[in-house]
């Protein structure tokens, strides 16, 4: 259970009303230092504590399937492919951005395997709180329930391809919603290499999105 933050008052004189004008709110929990040097408090996330560049850098270096695939396959590459599939299926620019950024929280909490996530009830709460901050960082509205369903379907579409091609598994879950399409995963990015393509796609989609909403 997350406790209420305590107020840490700096030393100094109080004003005429008896209130110290200089104080700062104590952050909750411990922090993770992100690539830019900022301190990101997982239990007390704030938009000024992380950048899109931090997210792209981290996701380019985090391997999916806890590293057990046939090659290095990063979360950043997965995210890029999700956005590409969204475009191919005709979804909006905003929904493509949601697909690109949908795993942004993993830049600070890592890519936990699904069997682990499913057994940590608090994980979803922490993840949702971080993602709410990431949408602020990106500068786009929070996804609707319909948007989430679309992103999940595309995420599952990549998952099926990843399981079959990178993990050589034929036990794809029958109870998940996904698009029956082939995504070639035979060639991809090594560790760190998806950062620039991720940022390039992000800039392109943001320009396209802002053009759409301002015209």
Image (cartoon, rainbow, N blue to C red):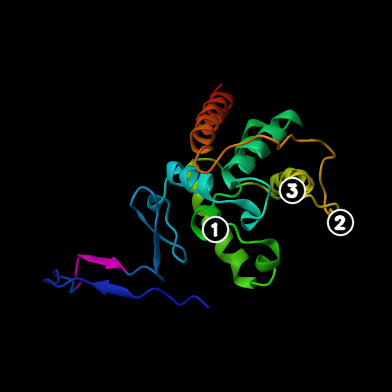
38 or 115, nearer to the observer: 115
Residue range (magenta) = 19-25
The residue singled out by tag 3 in the image is 159
Cα separation between marks 3 and 2: 13 Å
Q: Nearer the viewer, mark 3 or mark 2?
A: 3
Give neighbour class at mark 2: few <14, some 14-19, many 20+ (Cα, 10 Å).
Answer: few
**Residue position for label 1:** 110
The answer for how far apart the CA atoms under marks 3 and 1 are is 17 Å
The quadrant in which residue 183 appears is: top right
* Residue that lies at the very extreme toward the front in this rendered image: 70
x and y percentages locating residue 170 in the rendered image: 85, 52
SS category of the residue bearing label 2: loop
Graded by Cα atoms within 10 Å as few (under 14), some (14 to 19) or many (20 or more), the crowding at tag 3 reads some
Instruction: Verify whether residue 125 appears in magenta.
Output: no
- Left/right placement of residue 151 relative to residue 172 reads left
- First along the sequence among labels 3 and 1: 1
Compare residues 135 and 7 and report the one nearer the observer. Answer: 135
Q: Earlier along the polypeptide chain: callout 1 or callout 2?
A: 1
Q: Earlier in the sequence, mark 3 or mark 2?
A: 3
Residue drawn at (51%, 48%), measured in percent from left and top? 61
Compared to residue 38, the image places residue 179 above or below, namely above
What SS does tag 1 mark? loop
Q: Position of residue 153 (x, y in %)?
A: 76, 46
Question: Circle 3 — which element?
Answer: helix
Q: Position of residue 189 (x, y in %)?
A: 58, 37
* Residue linked to disc 2: 175
* Location of residue 168 with respect to 200 vertically, above or below: below
Q: In the displayed structure, would residue 152 be above or below residue 3?
A: above
Q: Residue at x 74, y 51 (%)?
A: 167
Which corner quadrant of the image does residue 68 belong to?
bottom right
């Amino acid at each position: 259970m997350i406790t209420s933050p305590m107020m840490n008052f700096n030393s100094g004189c109080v004003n005429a009303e008896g209130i110290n004008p200089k104080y700062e709110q104590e952050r909750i929990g411990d922090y993770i230092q992100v690539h830019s040097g900022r301190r990101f408090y997982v239990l007390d996330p704030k938009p000024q504590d992380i950048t899109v560049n931090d997210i792209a850098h981290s996701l380019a270096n985090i391997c999916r399937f806890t590293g057990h695939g046939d090659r290095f396959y990063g979360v950043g590459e997965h995210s890029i492919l999700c956005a590409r599939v969204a475009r191919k299926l005709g979804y909006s620019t905003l929904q493509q951005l949601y697909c690109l950024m949908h795993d942004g929280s993993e830049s600070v909490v890592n890519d936990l395997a699904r069997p682990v996530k499913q057994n940590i009830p608090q994980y979803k709460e922490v993840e949702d709180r971080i993602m709410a901050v990431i949408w602020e960082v990106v500068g786009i509205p929070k996804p609707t329930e319909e948007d989430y369903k679309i992103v999940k379907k595309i995420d599952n579409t990549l998952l099926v391809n990843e399981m079959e091609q990178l993990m050589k598994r034929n036990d794809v879950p029958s109870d998940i919603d996904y698009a029956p399409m082939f995504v070639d995963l035979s060639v991809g990015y090594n560790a760190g290499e998806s950062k620039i393509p991720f940022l390039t796609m992000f800039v392109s989609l943001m320009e396209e999105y802002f053009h759409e909403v301002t015209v």
